[in-house]
Image (cartoon, rainbow, N blue to C red):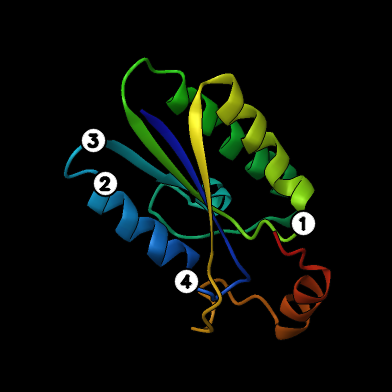
Amino acid sequence: MKQLILIRGLPGSGKSTLGELMGRSYRQTTQAFHIEADMFFLDAQGKYVYEAHKIYQAHKWCQETTETLLQSDEEVVVIVSNTFVQHWEMKPYFLIAEQHGAVMQIIECKGRFGNNHGVPIEVIQRMNDRWEDI
């Protein structure tokens, strides 16, 4: 069975940590991958170098990587953690899952752990104000 798991939440809510843990757990029994748009901004040494003007490219990369991973005929679990504040941000993943016969699951993280990328509190608040429940 193919699975696509979306992990959504505000910056600092625990999305990346949960995605990494789930990926490790699933890898004990099947192929599993954890990806997120932030990975697009890692340089060759693994340092996070965010460039706001490349955010569209980062999300496109994440979607294309998800699709590539689900194209396999084998059992696979793909875990994607991004903020996914509004429904339209998840829609491409629903289409990818449907095209490749993957079972879809959405998990929301609501923790407040402080974010790894220094996102200002005002930006997080604006994201919270736009948040759409499922």
Q: Quadrant of residue 122?
A: bottom right
Instruction: Give the amino acid at mark 2.
Output: Tyr
Q: Residue 25 bears which disc, if any? A: none
Rendering coords of residue 84 (x, y %): 67, 56
* Distance from the alpha carbon under mark 3 to that under mark 1: 31 Å
* Distance from the alpha carbon under mark 2 to that under mark 4: 18 Å
Residue denoted by label 1:
86
Q: Of tags 2 and 4, which is closer to the observer?
A: 2
Residue denoted by label 3:
30
Give the residue displayed 39% in from the left and 18% down from the top.
72
* Distance from the alpha carbon under mark 1 to that under mark 2: 27 Å
Instruction: Give the amino acid at mark 3.
Output: Thr
Q: Residue 14 bears which disc, if any? A: 4
Circle 3: is it few (<14), some (14-19), or many (20+) Cα within 10 Å?
A: some
Circle 1: is it few (<14), some (14-19), or many (20+) Cα within 10 Å?
A: some
Q: Residue 26 bears which disc, if any? A: 2
Which is nearer the N-term, disc 3 or disc 4?
4
Which is nearer the N-term, disc 1 or disc 4?
4
User: Is the Cβ of the residue at disc 3 closer than 8 Å to that at disc 2?
Assistant: yes
Give the residue displayed 64% in from the left and 60% down from the top.
83
The C terminus is located in which quarter? bottom right
- Can residue 53 be seen at all in this image of the molecule? no
Give 94 or 18, whichever is nearer the viewer: 94
Which is nearer the N-term, disc 2 or disc 4?
4
* Distance from the alpha carbon under mark 1 to that under mark 4: 18 Å
Which is nearer the N-term, disc 3 or disc 1?
3
Farthest residue, direction top? 73
Give the residue displayed 72% in from the left and 77% down from the top.
124
Instruction: Give the amino acid at mark 4.
Output: Gly
